[in-house]
Image: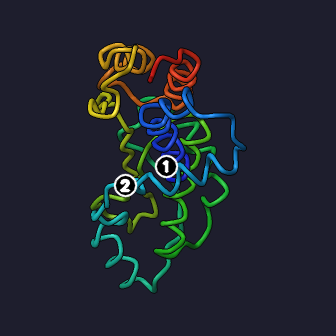
Amino acid sequence: MLQTRYKAFSLLLVMLVVFAPSYALAAPTSSGSLLNQIESSTPPTQLPKVSAPKIAPQVVTTLTENGSKMLLKGVRFEGNTTLSSSLLLASVKDFVGSELSVDDLLVLTDILVQFYATSGFLANVTLPEQDVTDGVVLFKVYEARFGGLLVDVDQIENARISENFIRQIVEVANPKFEVIELEKIDRAVLLLGDLGGLV
């Protein structure tokens, strides 16, 4: 779902920057034919591939040596700044006191990522190298930070709104190097759509 939301955001941004000229000049068309036109002329957005394992090999080895499951006695969090540890704990508390496998621990990381998304943030969660023999698991949270906006200048060559202005709209909403807040990015994209001038 998070990946879908990111793709939708990317597609909307591409639509604003690339296809706004055709909206201004073309006769009114149905939304279906417009979507088909966009899909046929827009290359699919490729998300970066993440190769790092979500669970450190040491954790997998420990579980394998101890019968493939562990009794989860508690959880700790590291790297979370936007959501408190108590909030994160509340999202997985039903699993504490249960026997968990490696696959179950992967489910917990996905639950935490989804909890971040429903709270309006992007994050990745992993289980780093650690000793889990005591039943307490450390989750490492990587909160996504906004690196800035890249604008394809070739696509907005004749725009009445400057590349710098487009960048400012987005980067004022969610400043560079701050944690990405999806609502702020959405609001900036909607504002750009309302402004027009990308022709």
Near mark 2 (Cα within 10 A), the count class, few <14, some 14-19 or many ≥20, is few
- Residue under circle 1? 7
Q: Position of residue 182 (x, y in %)?
A: 52, 32
Of labels 2 and 1, earlier in sequence is 1
Q: CA distance from mark 2 to mark 1?
A: 8 Å
Image height check: is 176 above or below 127?
Answer: above
| Amino acid type for the residue under numbered disc 1 | Lys
In the structure shown, which secondary structural element does the residue marked by tag 2 occupy? loop
Q: Position of residue 79 (x, y in %)?
A: 35, 39
Kindly identify which numbered label has been placed on residue 47: 2
In the structure shown, which secondary structural element does the residue marked by tag 1 occupy? helix
Dots 2, 1 in contact, CB < 8 A: yes
Residue placed most toward the observer, 181 or 102:
181
Near mark 1 (Cα within 10 A), the count class, few <14, some 14-19 or many ≥20, is some
| Amino acid type for the residue under numbered disc 2 | Leu
Kindly identify which numbered label has been placed on residue 19: none
Residue at 38% of width from left, 84% of height from top?
Answer: 64
Q: Position of residue 60 (x, y in %)?
A: 35, 75
Residue at 42% of width from left, 32% of height from top?
Answer: 17
